Each structure stands twice: as structure tokens, then as C-alpha cells.
Image (cartoon, rainbow, N blue to C red):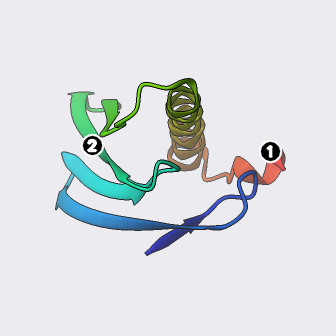
Amino acid sequence: MTWDFHDFPGAFPVHVKQTIKNKKIVLEWANSEGGSTQVVMNFEPLDKDSTLVRIEECGWENQIQESLDESYSHCQGWMQMLCCLKVYVEFGKNLREFFF
């Protein structure tokens, strides 16, 4: 599959490696280094109305400033995605409509 982002034009290939319903999603996608990173999303129920979501992205090969900047940009993107998901799940609204 591919993901497209309004704020970062272009198609980004995404390969889903594993899904465990209500627990985990593992995917890989390309980075600017010409390689790929692995993203692991873990979902942990805290109570009947709350879930803790942990996202880890690893596989950055180069510890140069450009790679670090891209990893920080991805971190911001995951935070934005989680905010949008929370608003959608709780209120049925597409928050991204208001971003761009």
C-alpha cells in the first residue's frame, strides 16, 4: 500500500509485516537514506475507556544530522496521527481537515 500526506507530497510505500488485533501493528517504509525503517505500534488497554499507544521506529542507519532530522520529523508525524485518531475515535471528526 502507499500513504500520501498533504504536508509531504508523494506516495510512500508501506509494507505491513504483522497485525495482532487490538494489540500490535508492525510495518516497514522507506526513508531518505535509501533503506527502510520498521515501525511497531503497541496498544495496551488501561481500562474500559483508555488505551496506551506506544510507537517505536527503528532502523536509521546513519547518525548524521539529516537522518536525525528525518527521525524527529517522523516522531512529530506519529504524534499528529495519534491526535487525529483520538479525535476520530472519540468524536467522529476528521481533524486533518482543519490542518491543511
Q: Quadrant of the rendered structure where residue 8 is?
A: bottom right
**Which residue carries the number 1 mark?**
99
Q: How many residues crowd around disc 2 within 10 Å: few (fewer than 14), some, or many (20 or more)?
A: some
On the image, the x and y values in percent for residue 22 come to 22, 49
**Observer-nearest of 53 and 57:** 57
Assign a secondary structure to mark 1. Answer: helix
Among the two numbered marks 2 and 1 on one chain, the one whose residue lies closer to the N terminus: 2
In which quadrant of the rendered image does the N terminus lie?
A: bottom left
Residue found farthest to the bottom: 1
**Which residue carries the number 2 mark?**
40
Q: Quadrant of the rendered structure where residue 6 is?
A: bottom right
Residue 92 left/right relative to 50: right
Identify residue type, mark 2. Answer: Val
Assign a secondary structure to mark 2. Answer: strand
Q: Residue at x 80, y 44 (%)?
A: 99
Q: Nearer the viewer, mark 2 or mark 1?
A: 2
Q: Residue at x 75, y 51 (%)?
A: 7
On the image, the x and y values in percent for residue 100 come to 84, 50
Q: Residue at x 66, y 58 (%)?
A: 5
Residue 39 left/right relative to 90: left
Q: CA distance from mark 2 to mark 1?
A: 25 Å
Q: Residue at x 30, y 56 (%)?
A: 27
